[in-house]
Amino acid sequence: MNILLAQQNYHIGNFESNTEKILQAIAEAKAQHADLIVFGELSICGYPPRDFLEFKDFVDRSYACIEQIKQAATDIAVLVGGPARNPEIQGKNLFNAAFFLYEGEIKAEIHKTLLPTYDIFDEDRYFEPAHEWKVVEFKGKKLAITICEDIWNLGDNPLYTECPMDVLTKQNPDVMINLSASPFDYNHATNRKAIVKANVKKYGIPMFYCNTVGSQTEVIFDGASLIFDKAGNVIKEFPSFVEVLDGAILKDNNSVEGNIQIPAIQVADKENVLEKLEPTLNIAAIYDALVLGIRDYFQKMKFKQAIIGSSGGIDSAVTIALACEALGPENVRAVLMPSPYSTSHSVDDAVRLSENLNNPYDIIHIDKIYESFLSELQPIFEDRPFSVAEENIQSRTRGNLLMAIANKLGYILLNTSNKSELSTGYGTLYGDMAGGLGVLGDCYKLQVYALARYINRNEEIIPENIITKAPSAELRPNQKDSDSLPDYEVLDQILFQYIEKRNGPNDIKALGYDPALVDRTLKMVNTNEYKRNQFCPIIRISPKAYGVGRRVPIVGKYLS
Amino acid sequence: MNILLAQQNYHIGNFESNTEKILQAIAEAKAQHADLIVFGELSICGYPPRDFLEFKDFVDRSYACIEQIKQAATDIAVLVGGPARNPEIQGKNLFNAAFFLYEGEIKAEIHKTLLPTYDIFDEDRYFEPAHEWKVVEFKGKKLAITICEDIWNLGDNPLYTECPMDVLTKQNPDVMINLSASPFDYNHATNRKAIVKANVKKYGIPMFYCNTVGSQTEVIFDGASLIFDKAGNVIKEFPSFVEVLDGAILKDNNSVEGNIQIPAIQVADKENVLEKLEPTLNIAAIYDALVLGIRDYFQKMKFKQAIIGSSGGIDSAVTIALACEALGPENVRAVLMPSPYSTSHSVDDAVRLSENLNNPYDIIHIDKIYESFLSELQPIFEDRPFSVAEENIQSRTRGNLLMAIANKLGYILLNTSNKSELSTGYGTLYGDMAGGLGVLGDCYKLQVYALARYINRNEEIIPENIITKAPSAELRPNQKDSDSLPDYEVLDQILFQYIEKRNGPNDIKALGYDPALVDRTLKMVNTNEYKRNQFCPIIRISPKAYGVGRRVPIVGKYLS
């Protein structure tokens, strides 16, 4: 049996384009004489559709696409994902389903059992878990079909009491097929391979694992679909971050034909749990994810060009380099906006960066606008000393200029704030926190440095001086980040313990960090929730990003 | 048995202040010789604690408070809400629990069964549903104790298959006691009384229903706790939006002592479903909710003073009047910022408003700042015609001025955008969309008018001209809202069908609205999700507000 996996990039709610993409792959699979083609989880509507699922109209449109797709499923079987209505009166009104289409009919409907509700997931909000589990018989093979999270409990996952494969295995399946929309983070591909391997080892049959690729606002799906033989060898690992149509032959004895990849991919037996931030871990994959995140956001929003404030600092330099890779340097406009407190080397460094990248840039001095603000505010400010108010006026003037150019000429403003800044509130709402997409908002400062080194791996793209000089917001004379913040080597590790590991103050102090610094850091994180709440979507590259996956009260008083 | 309900206002994560408040009420209840005092759902930590529950440290602190509170539960029983650890290895690691404290001990722990995941709720993210149901025996009475949502399925709620009272009723309870954190909306108090009555009718015993009061960022809890006798009469309905300690006597024959309120409150037998927007419905309650929302936000954030941009339009006028009521007029600073396109009557109207309210105001002309922006941007804008870019520069200049004054002098900026504008994207990011709290963001324009009439019910506070003139953003010559938007009488009804009713385009057209207008309106809503995503928290007064309760993809293509 020739099974193909379609690792595709869907657009949420864009039924027309998703269906067209699915039909094209079916046509190609037919040309390759495939018996079965497998698509990703909720492929028809895109994942995650979120509250669009509350609209009957949305689900109707999805069903209409199934009607269309099943016409093409004649001499080939098609496994495609979409919401399915629950005919029962009680319980959630939808299932997260896979439709098995063959001979122009819906031959089977498979429902997802394990509905994740952690981090970015909200599946219990919409879906009823499966009530029954049946293998699908097709051309003499019994297919055990599951959806994404269903394979993440092998009986020992504390989140779940059900284990759908434990039920299916009693029906003597020949192969496992999983339709996923499993998001990227810098540690997840490792863990995903480990869990697929663990399933293969436990149930003793091969696994065809089809993952989605592409960016959905903040969440990146990396693809990296997998085919394992029944011995636990990787037969195929699809490339990450690109669309692929590929597969393997499931033979009569349930062996899988296809060369075992050379060199053989080593797959860990257990998931990998990070105990501390490792800033260079999988930095190439992070780079690729960010580039995909930018590119896909622009393509799906039907924009071509980005505008970015270029300060001469490392965050804007890395963002500009990423945007040039994603969109082409001719589509990335850097705007240098020196204030009275900007140093000349900052302007020089920013100019050199754009010369290296060959992207257009402008220089707009903000001194006069800044002075006009101060002059109009003088009757209210009177002779009060310089404070954060004056710093923020500069930052917000830059935000206004960038947005004005974006509005006038049709750019999207990319934001350059990093996760260390966002954590501590070291940024200006409506100023340097403005933008449509947060490129580095899930990268700690140490990871931004690692990205800069990675970008410069072959040649100096980011001027060395940008990487080596002390970070500064340059909003008052001789300002340095270190005036307000702990050293990033310490700060980022404390933040990682709090954000990613959910450790409380005592746990973090027990790791040896200065108690006062721990308290001060956690307080900064919690008192600045109101700022992050107004921040744009952040491309997610970690297991815990700010945004939809981290939901904390704004008005609260915990560690603050 | 003398049972008191403590309708209290908690602060999320502020264990010290919540515990102190609980202990004070216990002391007062002892003085009143009460047998039992009942607090709200998750009263110890505040509701909703959201992802704070993922911190072991947070749950530890809650347990420490129970230890403290149980010392006070000696000659009085105390029912208090908090997270409880699930001792099982599998399943979610917490229950949403009520602790029954007596004789200095935890005598019983009651777990919530029905965990809502719709709208603002995320309870499946954190909590395991109850595994067992037992009445609590106390002083010869059997108490059927449930938590909030547990009473919202009488066997016919399609969301749920469980019905905890159906189990408890088999143990012959004498009384129902419910600990709630049930949020306000303009229709909810009616429905809450109907559901309590339906429970009383079905199970034939009295109900003591204790609800929380107060604002938690965007969500308002109105209190309005209820005591019903077993015949379905309202014995007590607590006032809304204030803290109350009150109760009734449960007599030996399970009758409830306390005068039936005169005039007898009529309670509907069924929940009330709104088929269209009724702009004046419960406008007094909406007013009170908004005042509480503002006041509580400031108190919990430890701020005293608000700053508001005053345009001479109705949205800012209503916001300023609400803020004056919530904070005192001396604490509300209005800033008039006329541009070259402002009409003189706007300034006059805004001045007269602040004279009526007796709140301080400033006038800052933005012409010079605006000119300095245009001058610096001239090399980029060249001779392109006036566009939304120039409009937005004015709006963002105002945002910058307001934030500068707020930063310098310690104000919170209140936002004045209404739900009609936010729905259609008729506002400027970082401009008139700036602010810490959205006062009117859940009120359609027609409701804003109703609020203005309500505010003026005794005397003209909002100048009549503000209410009667045609709405305008005044960002270009002779601009009117009606240049860009449909009439609010039609627009608001279409929006209500789409947002509140989740009707799709065909359903709305079938109601008789112009098809092209429906399509255009829904497209405006969906393409402007990126703007609302960066908006501040909105005080929620409807069953479906923008914010945590409405989660839709930003990058998507559905009806857009």
Image: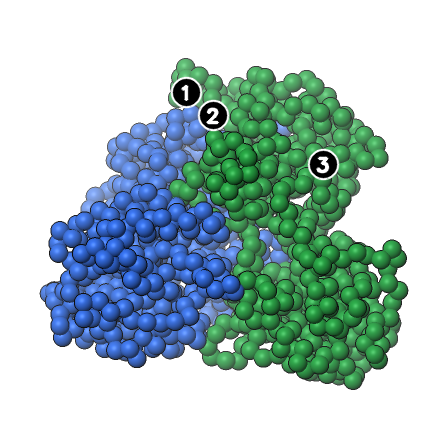
Chain colours: A blue, B green
Q: Which residue is mark 2?
A: B389
Q: Give the CA distance from mark 2 to mark 3.
A: 33 Å
Residue situated in front as seen by the camera: B330 or B52: B52
Q: Chain of mark 1?
A: B
Mark nearer the N terminus (2 vs 3) = 2
Residue type at mark 3: give it: Ala
Label 2 crowd bin: few (<14), some (14–19), many (20+), radius 10 Å: many
x, y percent for residue B444: 63, 38
- Tags 1 and 2 touching, CB below 8 Å: yes
Residue B493 appears anywhere in the view: yes
Mark nearer the N terminus (1 vs 2) = 1
x, y percent for residue B217: 63, 51
Q: Which residue is mark 3?
A: B450
x, y percent for residue A124: 47, 62
Q: Residue B179 shows which numbered tag?
A: none
Q: Residue at x 26, y 63 (%)?
A: A209
Question: Relative to residue A290, is residue B282 drawn left or right?
Answer: right
Residue A348 appears anywhere in the view: no
| Quadrant that contains the C terminus of chain A | bottom right
Residue type at mark 2: give it: Ala
Relative to A365, residue B162 above or below: below
Label 1 crowd bin: few (<14), some (14–19), many (20+), radius 10 Å: some
Q: Closer to the camera: disc 2 or disc 3? A: 3
Secondary element at tag 2: helix
- Tags 1 and 3 touching, CB below 8 Å: no
Secondary element at tag 3: helix
Q: Which residue is mark 1?
A: B381
Using the rendered image, report if marks 1 and 3 lie on a common chain. Answer: yes
